[in-house]
Amino acid sequence: MEVVVMIVAAALGILVFHTMRFRDRRKECTEYVNLALDFFEADHRFLTFKDEEKRYFMVNRAFLLLHGKKQEDFIGKTDGELQRKDLAETLEKMDDHVLSTGTPVEEVVYAHERVYRIRKFPVRLPGKKAGIGINAEDITEDIAYEKELARIIRRNEILISAFAKDFASSHEQLDYVLYQALELTGSDYGYIYLFDEEKKLFSLENFAVKGKVSSKRRSYKQNYRLENMGLWSQSVRTKEAHIFNREKRSARNTEEEDYFNLMTVPVILEDQVVAVVGVANNPKGYTKVDAEELSLLMIGVWNAKDRREFSLALRDMNADLLENKEKLTLILNSSADGIYGMDTKGNFTFINQSALTLLGYEKVSDFIGKNCHEMIHHKRKDGSSYPEKECRIYDAIPKGETVTCEDEVFIRKDGTAFSVQYSAHPQIRNDRIIGAVVTFSDITERKKQEEDVLYLTYHDSLTGLHNRPYLEKVYHDLEQEENYPMSVVVGDVNGLKLSNDIFGHQRGDQFLKRIAEVIKHSIREEDLVFRVGGDEFYLFLRSTREEDARVVMHRIQKAVEMEDFQGVRGSISLGLSVKTVDGLTLEEVLNDAEQNMYREKTLRAKMEGKKQLSYLISQLMSYPKERAHAENTRNYARAIGEALKLRQDELKALEDAAYLHDVGKIPTIIGKNKGEMSFYPTRKDHAVIGYRILNAFEETADIAKAVLSHHEKWNGTGYPKGLSGEEIPLLSRIIAVAEKFDRLTGISYGKPISKEEALQHLDREKGETLDPKVVNALKEAV
């Protein structure tokens, strides 16, 4: 019997043990499922699932906020029922591909003036049914960034082509550049007018229309006086680019739109306007960036044209110059380039006036018979000594060949150096080399422009950080073992979209610039930081272990969080991965760091949202009058809602919306505080801005529409949509009455009137600007 009892007890013990293990395992599985759902809801991408009938059955919060709708608006419906016809066809075609082939598909789709990268892939639903998983990202800013980079690269290609291409004439060279300028600026028309400073006259040199060069060299010039040339004259007088953008309007008797946009850019050499270039009819209008690009292009090309003309003239006249010393002196002294001659021993034999001026001398006698190298060519760019035996100019004499160079310097009388482009031509008489003729010009400004072009090619124009092309350039160097362990950090700025929505893209750009400064000052000089997208940064910390990298990351995040970007608190999500000798490839490390960043961004999304919302509200409520108005409006709205017998959940939403109905005033309040009101929107815009702010946060998204419409009027004369009657949400109509009543009776808005007088005033507005039912409810409540 005791044995039986022991066996039963043991069996019961085993059963209890396995039951407890099963419960623990089920609890653990439930926690994993909840964690996955949290990831799904908090992910910043737009995530959805469809069944085999292409109907939505799961959508995340980011997707709902994008469309401004609720889950029930999507669940069980197809894109054909929800989207415009052309967009629905594109999306359902992707669905058909996934369901029919069982393979993923990715496309870039344009919708609602934004650009999205959409990926669809097969999933297996409960019950072994086929389904579709979908994730989408807004890549509008990345596309814009790539277009800007393409413009910079295209401009550099045009410059290189204009410098290197062999043209039959300067006129043909300008025709070519004008054609390229039309492509670069997206214009229909282009003009080049030469300008005579002394006579104050323009003459048409080149003209192009619809991307084709139309100008023909004429035997006479079409001349125009300075005072008769409108914007062209302004560019001469101010020595600056001028832009005239006229808004589109319908042309008479046609369905086309009529517009005329013009940009004029002066070409300035030695502080004199030598020409004015104009382009016209870019449908989108012109910007300062267009003007800067066209100016850089034309100045560079004009210098190349002048050098080409002089070189041709020098070549054609070389034989006559040797025979006629007087003619030689005249021509040499009329040249803007410096020219000197030397004998076979390297001593000066002649020098022109331009060379004297460029070198800082006054008399020819200071040079004749003296050694050329010792006087003007004895140092390198870095200031080190340049031995005469290594001088490339001297190679022209023994080799009998022309030697050219543009990466050396000449030395002035005062000891300063300047960058030169020189050509040394062997001087031949009676088939014998008797010396060389050297032509040179000061290319300090051109070198600076080339450095600027190189800088723009490998740097982000907004932040000054390195860009993606530079990353591709140094990628191989980063893969070298001497850098390891190398910590790779991927950062993504939080709150940029909110800043853009509230303050506009100009302030958003300042937001990004300040973030870039904070990051740059938080790392070492030998570390590299890149801006690779709209709000994404890469950091490469050489010879840095994981624990040290996390110290840097903490320093960056704390520094960013200390910043107040015009009312938006700074925040950045960072992800880390470490490249070791035997570990992942650099590309895999980058991907790992990016995934870690997205994971952190997802986990912190709710917390960051709450902190940001609280900060914005505190900005508004820090002003006693605004706080008093918000509280009074909330109390009156609550009283009206109770009189109308609203449900408790409706009353809660009403109170929240009434309290925050003026949250869109934050830009104006901050603008007044900082003395920058010229930037901020008009009073009528604050309802829209308030909607954008509230719609950005999960806690307030459900009251955003009530705030958006609280300035609509019963008779349809309100804003922003001009809604009328019961088209206006009920909560918005209640807020309108409550707010108006407080403005009439509250001490915050001038001289208050009595409640009785205020109610009489509201009675007069019933059926006009205010909902009669709501006004009556207020009278009942107060």
Image (tube, rainbow, N blue to C red):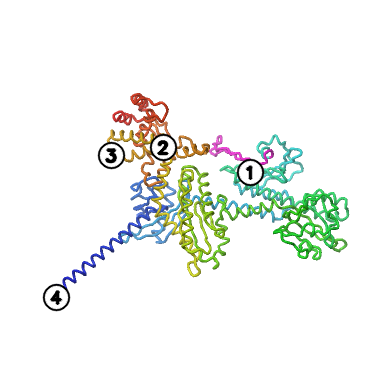
Q: Front-most of 518 and 83? A: 518
Q: Is residue 254 magenta?
A: yes
Q: Decide which of tag 3 and tag 2 comes sooner along the chain.
A: 3
Nearer the observer, disc 3 or disc 1? 3
Residue occupied by mark 2: 662
Residue 418 coordinates in the image, percent (x, y): 73, 54
Specify the amino acid type for callout 2: Asp
CA separation in Å, label 1 and label 4:
105 Å
Residue occupied by mark 1: 279
Q: Is residue 383 left or right of residue 568?
A: right
Q: Decide which of tag 2 and tag 4 comes sooner along the chain.
A: 4
Q: Quadrant of residue 238?
A: top right
Residue 411 coordinates in the image, percent (x, y): 76, 55
Residue occupied by mark 3: 647
Residue occupied by mark 4: 3
Specify the amino acid type for callout 3: Arg
- The range drawn in magenta is 236-265
Residue 94 coordinates in the image, percent (x, y): 42, 55
CA separation in Å, label 2 and label 4:
81 Å
